[in-house]
Amino acid sequence: MNIGDAARRSGLPPKTIRYYEEIGLIQPARSQSGYRDFSEADAHKLTFLGRARALGFSIEDCRTLLGLYEDESRSSSDVKQLARDHLVQIEDKIAALQSMQATLSHLVDACAGDDRPDCPILRDLAEG
């Protein structure tokens, strides 16, 4: 299948597919005329990568996950540890966002929002 077909099957844009090929995540065959010729396995890998990226895994984590997926002698504990580490990162990001939300919410509530120049939001930003 060509890159357009692979894009439709995987839900990924052709530009992303070209990038994944460039960095070695996938290696589709090439026709005699030089066009990419994606197999069913390639389309499946692209779908796998799209799902992993949608869950926030980094490119390097995706590389590791794909390697584990293709390794039938893998240990599921390796996969679980990678996912657990990623989950901790997500939880840390959520905590940071919640802290930002609380701070900004407090500042918005403290600001009169009228015609006066006094603004606790700007004062807080300036104080760092």
Image (cartoon, rainbow, N blue to C red):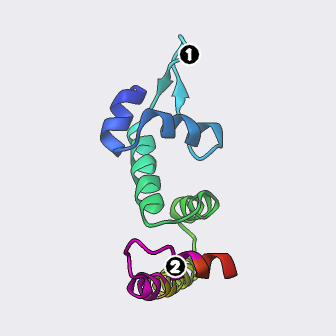
Q: Is any part of residue 83 visible from this angle?
A: no
Q: Nearer the viewer, mark 2 or mark 1?
A: 2
- Give 34 or 125, whichever is nearer the viewer: 125
| Residue 110 among those drawn in magenta | yes
Please give the name of the residue rendered at 52% of the width and 82% of the height, measured from the top-left corner.
Answer: 120
- Location of the C terminus by quadrant is bottom right
Residue lying farthest left?
Answer: 8
Residue lying farthest right?
Answer: 127
Q: Amino acid at mark 2?
A: Asp
Q: Is residue 19 above or below residue 89?
A: above
Q: Under tag 1, what secondary structure?
A: loop
Q: Position of residue 104 (x, y in %)?
A: 47, 81
Q: Position of residue 123 (x, y in %)?
A: 60, 80
Q: What residue does disc 1 label?
A: 34
| Residue 10 among those drawn in magenta | no
Please give the name of the residue rendered at 51% of the width and 79% of the height, measured from the top-left corner.
Answer: 118
- Give 64 or 69, whichever is nearer the viewer: 64
- Give 79 or 70, whichever is nearer the viewer: 79
Q: Earlier in the sequence, mark 2 or mark 1?
A: 1
- Location of the N terminus by quadrant is top left
Q: Under tag 2, what secondary structure?
A: loop
Magenta-tinted stretch: 104-122
Q: Is any part of residue 112 visible from this angle?
A: yes
Please give the name of the residue rendered at 40% of the width and 71% of the height, measured from the top-left corner.
Answer: 115
- Compared across the picture, whether 43 is left or right of 97 comes to left
Whole-number angstrom distance, CA of label 2 to CA of label 1: 65 Å
Q: What residue does disc 2 label?
A: 118
